[in-house]
Amino acid sequence: MRKIILSTLFILGLSFLFILRPVGIFIPQVSADETEEEKINRLSREIEQYENEIKRLKTEAGTLANQVAQFDAQIRLTSLKIAETEEKIFLLGGRIDQLEGSLSSLTKAFTSRVIKTYKMSRFGEPSFMLLAAKDLNHAVSSYHYLQRIQEADRDLLVRLEKAQVAYIDQKSEQETLQQKLQDQKNVLGIQKTAKASLLAQTKNDEIKYQQLLAQSRSEFEAIQAIIAGKGDETKVGKVNKGERIATIIQGASCNSSGEHLHFIARQGNSTVNPFTYLKPEGNYENCSGSSCGSPDGDLFNPVGSWDWPIRPKIKLSQGYGSTWATRNTWVRQIYSFHNGIDINSDSSSDVLAVEGGTLFRGSYGGSGGCRLRYVRVDHDNTDFDTLYLHINY
């Protein structure tokens, strides 16, 4: 009996090592100079510094150098965020490894304890203990020892359940961080592309950059005025759905850096998302993001019944509302909300009426000395009208 008790005490001692072992504690391998936690804290401080630097740059003059500095600061900021997330994933990975080891050890310990407790319970009933014991004190001592063993088993089970919950939570956090890391890397690629695009457009020339801004401001001013009904218009007459009403200007013009149709849908005095009213179209290419077909492009999700104002294949260069361009490029200095969609077609320059109605031809002369031409269709029997800009008639 003494040998059994000593053996049991030895196993119980091992079990208590698992019981007392802290769950989820991971001491990472780090250099003597900086721990992982210290590195994460340092990165957090640097991130805050760059966020403040970007705020400062946005208050300064709108020069090309300033815009490039903003791009550089954004790129550095995103790189720091990536490094911070990677450090968190590394630290969490160590904790998960520790949890896996603890969970495995706790499971083995609990399984072993269940078997041994069962055996002791079977042969350790009070009546058997009383008969087998040398004296009454020895029997009472054995009975109380069995009770302590069973209490330790229950405690071990609780710790095992907590370790399982902690492991599931840590794995979920790891998956969240992995997705965050991928998103941050996508943003970094976008920022680098946007900077490269700006330098390509301006040839890194301040004068060209200021010309680009002036042209965009003039275009935005003219479009806003046309939407407000300030354009000079001439009534043409009735037009049918699908009828040719204009052509897209080929190449750049005084109010556009490249050929495209700026299509606006208006209900009453407010613009609305054209995709809500244009019919579904499968023959298209989305070039509204960092590159054609990139996953960061604006939504192309038409769900209405109107015909398209151009013939397919449709090429989308900017969507409606808050767009990739307004969030990531220099155009955010001019506007933050795109009031229409920019589209083009490789097959035809014809502009078509999306619905039947009354056709008007108009233009507006902005501050830049350029008259922006457009046509407008007042839809029959509704409070809708559609505007077609950057066109000839």
Image (spheres, rainbow, N blue to C red):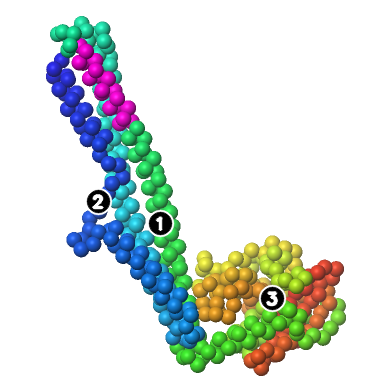
Rendered position, 119 above or below 277:
above
Q: Which residue is mark 3?
A: 263
Looking at the image, is mark 1 or mark 2 nearer the viewer?
2
Q: CA distance from mark 3 to mark 2?
A: 59 Å
Which residue does the image show at 55% across and 80% down from the upper left? Answer: 333
Q: Residue 178: which disc?
A: 1
Image quarter hosting the C terminus: bottom right
Location of residue 263 by image quarter: bottom right
Q: Amino acid at mark 2?
A: Ile
Looking at the picture, tell me which residue is in the foreground, 153 or 141: 141
Rendered position, 59 above or below 109:
below
Packing grade of label 2 (10 A; few <14, some 14-19, many >=20) is: few
Mark 2 residue element: loop
Query: Is the C-beta separation of discs 3 and 2 under 8 Å?
Result: no
Rendered position, 141 above or below 107:
above
Q: Position of residue 239 (x, y in %)?
A: 83, 77
Q: Amino acid at mark 3?
A: Phe
Packing grade of label 1 (10 A; few <14, some 14-19, many >=20) is: some
Which is nearer the N-term, disc 1 or disc 2? Answer: 2
Q: Which residue is mark 2?
A: 27
Looking at the image, is mark 3 or mark 2 nearer the viewer?
2
Q: Position of residue 228 (x, y in %)?
A: 73, 79
Is residue 350 something one can see in this rendering? no
Image quarter hosting the N terminus: top left
The magenta segment is 139-157
Which residue does the image show at 53% across and 72% down from the upper left? Answer: 327
Which is nearer the N-term, disc 3 or disc 2? Answer: 2
**Magenta part mainly helix, strand or loop?**
helix
Residue that protrudes farthest toward the top in the picture: 131
Location of residue 38 by image quarter: bottom left
Which residue does the image show at 27% across and 20% down from the upper left? Answer: 147
Which residue does the image show at 28% across and 58% down from the upper left? Answer: 36
